Image: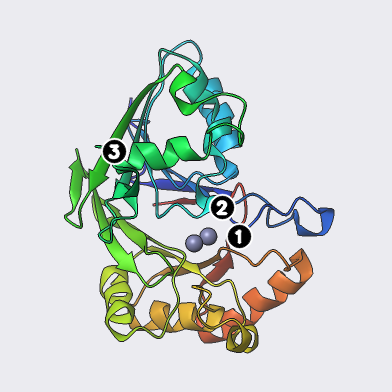
Amino acid sequence: MDNDFRLCMTFWGVRGSTPTPQIENLSYGGNTPCLEVLLPNNEVFIFDGGTGIRTLGASLLQRAGDQKVSLKVFLTHFHWDHIQGIPFFPPLYYEENEVTFHSVGFLEGTHRRMGSNSGLEETLKEQMRNPYFPISFDFLPAKKGFVEIDLEPLKFGKLTIHPFPLHHPGKAFGYRIESEGAVIVYATDLEHGHQELDTVVRDFSQNADLLIFDSQYTPEEYEKQKGWGHSTWLEGCRVANEAKVEQLALFHHDPSYDDQKFFQIVQKARRKFENTVGAQEGYSVVL
Ligand SMILES: [Zn+2]
Ligand SMILES: [Zn+2]
């Protein structure tokens, strides 16, 4: 039987750059980026494979009981904090499961540099190659698929996933996720100040129910971190206001932020955009 919602998004990893398992960070969470998007028919779409994907995978196996799981994973890019949980993703360790990875084919040939037919597959294999990991990606028994997508919207039943480019070193891609009128925009790992791509993120965020935005820095910190590929809570508020979104989630928290500092940032942001939350592991938005 179908559930009574259109989209249900849960944060499993919210931290930028590196996991931060210190006790003073754990109210918001120390795992690197991973989102679960659940559809009413219990289909699951995963966005990014940071360390949060490990606990998500364990939860999915538990929910499935003795049934196989079939999952689609969308990656924003291949910086380590967005893929480092994949070697520990439990569904990959059972041959009955299916996991299909998607990413936008890198237009500047990053994917192709290994001369493989599937740059996405090669790139994921790389991080598990000897001596970085004791077993190879090929050894993981689940049925694995690799789909390099372009910037056209993808349809999966009622769900549409529309990638868009972000201003980030080596490129990254955001996703507008839409089903039956419910809209979630995942825009992480972007730096504002690129005229064309600033417009793109506003266009793709139009009227979203939830905008998840890279707000790694405060405006003051940003002055010293220009060119590092990340944005601020203030820019998140600007995009949220201009694109008329319903709710803003500040995301990709700097590793230096403890819960207290981040809580204060969220309070500041609420003065610029009232319906702001700080992304927190375990927090779900049901639309
Ligand atoms: Zn990142
Ligand atoms: Zn990045």
- The residue that label 2 is drawn on is 81
Q: Residues within 10 Å of mark 3 (few under 14, many from 20)?
A: few
State the separation of the CA atoms marked 3 and 1: 28 Å
Q: Position of residue 281 (x, y in %)?
A: 62, 50
Residue at screen point 65% across, 55% down:
18
Above or below 132: residue 79: below
- The residue that label 3 is drawn on is 116
Question: From this viewpoint, which residue is outermost toward the right?
Answer: 23
Q: Position of residue 180 (x, y in %)?
A: 23, 50
Circle 1 SS class = loop
Mark whose residue sits in front, 3 or 2: 3
Relative placement, left or right, of 66 versus 147 is: right
Q: Residues within 10 Å of mark 2 (few under 14, many from 20)?
A: many
Circle 2 SS class = helix
Q: Position of residue 163 (x, y in %)?
A: 27, 57
Q: Are marks 1 and 2 in contact (CB under 8 Å)?
A: yes
Q: Is mark 2 within 8 Å of ligand 1?
A: yes
Label drawn at residue 17: 1
Query: Which of the 4 quarters of the picture holds residue 202?
Result: bottom left
